[in-house]
Amino acid sequence: MALPWKRICLPVCGLIRHIAALQIPSTRRKHSVPWYQEIQQTPDKTKKDQKEDQRSILRNPGIVTVRKLSKEELCQHLAQNVVYREGPLLAINKPQGLSIAGSSEEISLVSILPDLQQLLEIKPELHVVKAAPKESSGLVLLSTCHVTTKNFEDFYSQCRKAKKPFTTFRAITLGVPDPAEGDVKVALKEEDIKDLRLVIPVTDPSKGSLERREVKETRTLYKVLDSADGCSLLQLQPMTVFREQLLVQCTLKFCPILGDHTYSARVAKILGKDAYIPFELALPQTQRVEEKILRKMQFSSQQMHRMPLHLHLHQLLMPKDPQGRYPAHLQAPPLPFFQRTMALLGLRVQN
């Protein structure tokens, strides 16, 4: 894929800096309904239903903020959202913002596994097989059997060698990629920009940088599942693993993920055309959203710092089980706020 800064000429540097300066500066409830319960709508709406339709995701169904939960509350929440349990395997649907290992200063999944294990009355020790990254919601596969875990790890290693995707994400994006189905291939690296550790694309990586693993070639398959009024519901299948890979790759298609307050500033409109803003000018900040989309979502620009990232690990491929105990794949429906956003924006998954 040709990178956007190779295709677009931005003639006036001062114009770019002016647009970047206009970006909104960054600022930084708990529900009891299990996430895997679908949001249902009936054809004949009551007045109460109609009133509910006027509420944003901040009120209905609400957003889980991990940093505001105690260890006990988080364990209870995860226990309510078990989506699969068979033999040594356990799968849960985690909230965005929950890291897997994390630092000693923050609550992570690994740090609360003993408590979760006790709450679910599981005697053997749980460990992580595969999990959605911190910034994403979705599937976390756990196991109590190291032999089973080794079988899964071998299976996923074979998938990588065969270039077969085994994780499927869903994302709501601002923008519709062209073409509607394809892949994004780009080299990525981490770089310090004004005291921030960010991921940037590399146009022509040297052989040495790739060998030293300073730069990594990445690839993601994508498909538009639905689109409406300039927004998309995307299926994303990463073929490689790199920190924040999907967020950066979506900006390269001029389709930042809704709720991306880290990389979305790299995309802007200049004279009605999509343009890619230089990295040193596009620092992390509260995402900017068109007024017409904000109105549909019952949101204001002042509330945008509370918009969660709409990226969800929806499906995980499973190895074939000779005993037939496991399904071909695991699924975890998007969280209620994600489904609510889909409804407000008029996005649907075609059956």
Image (cartoon, rainbow, N blue to C red):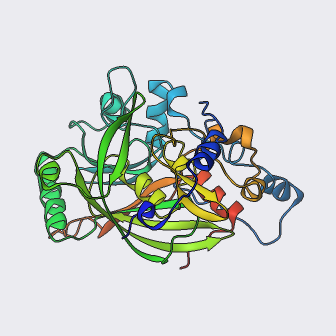
Residue drawn at point x = 50 percent, y = 33 percent: 66
Q: Quadrant of residue 191?
A: top left
Image spot of residue 48 (x, y percent): 85, 54
**How many tags in the picture?**
0
Give residue 88's position: percent from left, percent from top. 22, 50
Query: Residue 101: x percent and y percent?
Result: 30, 33
Q: Give 233 or 182, whichever is nearer the viewer.
A: 182
Q: Quadrant of residue 172?
A: bottom right
Residue 340, percent from left and from top: 65, 56
Q: Is residue 287 visible?
A: no
Q: Residue at x 17, y 57 (%)?
A: 152
Q: Residue at x 65, y 57 (%)?
A: 341
Q: Is residue 129 left or right of residue 194?
A: left
Q: Is residue 9 above or below residue 103?
A: below
Q: Would you say residue 269 is visible in this rendering? A: yes
User: Residue shown at 29%/38% (left/top)?
Assistant: 122
| Quarter in which the N terminus is drawn | bottom left
Residue that extends furthest to the top in the rendered view of this protein: 105
Which of the 4 image quarters holds residue 319?
bottom left
Q: In the image, is residue 199 above or below residue 313?
A: above
Q: Is residue 24 left or right of residue 148?
A: right
